[in-house]
Amino acid sequence: METEEFGRIAAQIFKQVIIQKVREAEREVIVDDYTKRVGEVIIVTVKRVDRGNVYVDMGGVDGMISKFDLIPNESTRKNDRLRAYIKDVKSTPRGAQIFLSRTAPEMMIQLFEMEVPEISEGVIEIMGGARDPGLRSKLAVKSKDKRLDPIGSCIGMRGSRVQAVSNELNGERVDIILWDEDPAQFVINAMAPAEVSSIVVDEDKNSMDIAVEDDQLALAIGRGGQNIKLASRLTGWKLNVMSINESEDKQAEENQKVSGKLAEQLGVDSEVAGVLIEEGFGSIDEVADADADALESIEEFDVSMVEELQERASDAQLVQALGDAESSEVLMGVEGMDEDLVQALIEAEIATVDDLAELSIDELLDIQEMDKEKASSMIMTARENEGWFD
């Protein structure tokens, strides 16, 4: 090979290496720049639509909105200008990949921050948002100034502010909800436009039973469960909607179970247990730890009866603690079990591996939130341990 030809090849290789290094440096600059901007809403221009995915120009930089991050039934064409939320940035050998979304709840939140000066000024605070993209969404707000109506401010004169956000989201209807530090009141607010008649909170299961009048039931649930799903996502609580009659029947059934259990633990009849529950003493812990004067103030009880009840409740606590310890040890033997789940199972009166084996996946998920696959695996392991498949 001649020296001149070798020199040309070497120069070509050197040039390619330089170009590659420059491209890598440019890619890293773009990645660093847009990584800092993740969470922003920006204006982009549609370059092309391919297999449902929209490829956009972000001002010299390309991005993509996948079909899963587009608002359903939204028509998008080349050269359209629209707003999108920067969701993620990745560095690949082919260059920087910037992923955007028009369905993220954060996008709706930022649109309101742009549209409502009181939010950007910090007078009104957005506490959360939930969306069914293109159809309906809920936004929770509160005011730091008691003189200012946060809902009215977000709606705007003749609905101008909320309408501007709705137009940007392809006509998505937005409910503005007043946030409340009381979880039950927040849920009642979030259920709008439905009117809630009563609510029962179960903090252990992070759930609430919501009772409404019969003519409010369809409104409370919403089309396809939309209203209840959005309210649940917004508040972070599992919500169960039912009619007043259904709620009363469920409450009576639960009271009967509690009454029967309390009567058995204290060795008393159902009438005495019923009185205790009516007065707010629905467990052996509440009876044992109660102030004696509070129990003595109950018309049907005297001093000696109170002393006897509290003594029996203390004995029952000891028996229960020993039983819980044995149950905990047994349940911990199931592969994948942890202390939090054991505690939740015991509180739900699942005290043995056989009790666990009898559960369905949904019943276990009601006791504690977890991956469905994990729930299925634990139940199958319990059944295997109990010899179901022998």
Image (cartoon, helix red, strand yellow):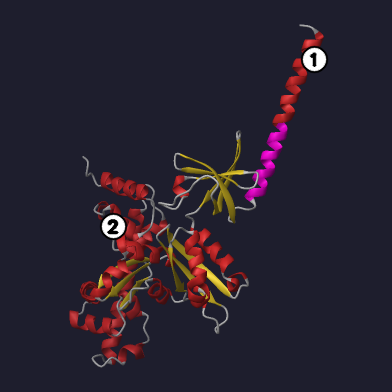
In the rendered image, residue 279, in percent from the top left (x then y), is placed at 29, 85
Report the predominant secondary structure element of the magenta stretch: helix
**Quadrant of the rendered image containing residue 56:** top right
| Amino acid type at mark 2 | Glu
In the rendered image, residue 125, in percent from the top left (x then y), is placed at 55, 72
- In the picture, the disc for residue 215 is none
Q: Is 27 in the magenta?
A: yes
The answer to whether the residues at label 2 and label 1 have Cβ atoms under 8 Å apart is no
Residue located at (45% from left, 58% from top): 170
In the rendered image, residue 200, in percent from the top left (x then y), is placed at 32, 74
Left or right: 23 in relation to 386: right
Q: Secondary structure at mark 2?
A: helix
Instruction: Return the residue nearer the eye: 1 or 384.
Output: 1
In the rendered image, residue 205, in percent from the top left (x then y), is placed at 36, 65
Question: Is residue 67 at all visible to an observer of this figure?
Answer: yes
Residue located at (63% from left, 72% from top): 121
Per the image, the residue denoted by label 1 is 7
- In the picture, the disc for residue 363 is 2
Q: Which residues are magenta?
A: 21-35
Q: Secondary structure at mark 1?
A: helix
Instruction: Return the residue nearer the eye: 129 or 176.
Output: 176
| Amino acid type at mark 1 | Gly
Instruction: Return the residue nearer the eye: 70 or 369.
Output: 70
Q: Is 183 in the magenta?
A: no
Q: Quadrant of the N terminus?
A: top right
Question: Is residue 269 at all visible to an observer of this figure?
Answer: no
Is label 2 or label 1 in front?
1
Instruction: Return the residue nearer the eye: 200 or 43.
Output: 43
